[in-house]
Image (cartoon, rainbow, N blue to C red):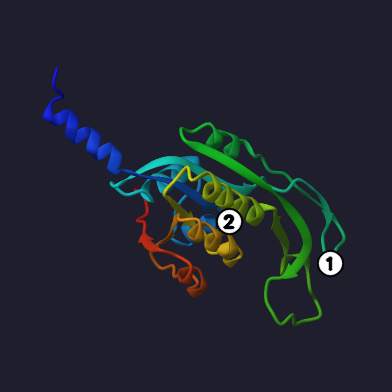
Amino acid sequence: MQPSHFGAEALLFAVDQMKVAVLIDGGHLRVVSRIAGHHYDPDFIEKIAHACVDGSETLLRALYYDCAPYNGKVKKPVSGEELEFKGSDSWLRELAQRNLFAVRQGVLKFRGFKPKKIPVTGKDLTDDDFKPDFEQKGVDMRIGLDIANFAHEKSVDRIILVSGDTDCIPAMKHARIAGLQIVLVDFENHKPAPELLWHTDLRRHAGWPS
C-alpha cells in the first residue's frame, strides 16, 4: 500500500522539528514574574515552559532549578528574639510530577540579616529595619552540568535558557562549540545582560501566560 500524501507530509513535519530542552532558573523567573504582577505556582511555571517553545520545535524536557524554602531558627538582629522560618517544598514536588518536567534542587542558605535601606541611619533601629538574607547554593552548577550533558549527548538541537545569570556563560560557550544552539528568553520590561547575548544564537521574547 502506498503511503498517503498526508502521511508523507506529517513525516516530513516530524523530521523537520528541532528537539529542544527548556532550562528555567527559578530564582530569575520568580523575580521578573512577580515584578510583572503574576502569581507564581506550578501551573504558571508549566505555562511559561511551553510558551518558550515555538511551532518548529519539539520539547524533549523542561528542567526547573530552584531551592526549597529555608527552614530553621535564627536570632533577630536587634532584639535577639528567636525567629523561626517554616516553608514547604510541596510545590516543587508537584511540579516534578508534571509531564516532561524535571526539578533540580539546590540549597538555600541563611546568611544573616541586611538593612532594608542603605545607608543605615538613626540610633533607634529595630528588627523591622532589617530583612533576612538568603543565598542559593548549587543551582548554577546544576544548570551548567545539564547544559554540558546535553552538549555531550547531542540529545537536543537547541537549549532554551530562562536565566539572567552570567555564571551560565562557560556552559553556553561549551554547548555552542559542540554544535548546539542557545536560545535566550526574555520577557516584557526585562533586558538580559549583554554578556549573555554575546554567547547566544537566538534571542526570544516570551509573553506572559493568561
Instruction: Determine which of the numbered discs, if any, sits on residue 66 in the image.
Output: none
- Residue 166 locus on image (x, y percent): 57, 67
Q: Give the numbered dot on residue 78.
A: 1
Kindly report the distance in space between the C-alpha atoms of the residues bearing marks 1 and 2.
29 Å
- Residue at the (38%, 64%) spot, across then down: 188
Residue 18: x %, y % from top left = 35, 46
> Within the image, what quadrant is residue 170 found in?
bottom right
Q: Earlier in the sequence, mark 1 or mark 2?
A: 2
Left or right? Give the position of 164 relative to 129. Answer: left
Viewer-nearest residue: 32 or 172: 172
The residue at 68%/71% (across/down) is: 116
**Marks 1, 2: nearer the viewer:** 2
Q: Which mark is residue 27?
A: 2
| Numbered marks: total | 2
As drawn, 32 above or below 149: below
Relative vertical location of residue 160 with respect to residue 68 in this rendering, above or below:
below
Residue furthest toward the right? Answer: 80
Q: Residues within 10 Å of mark 1 (few under 14, many from 20)?
A: few
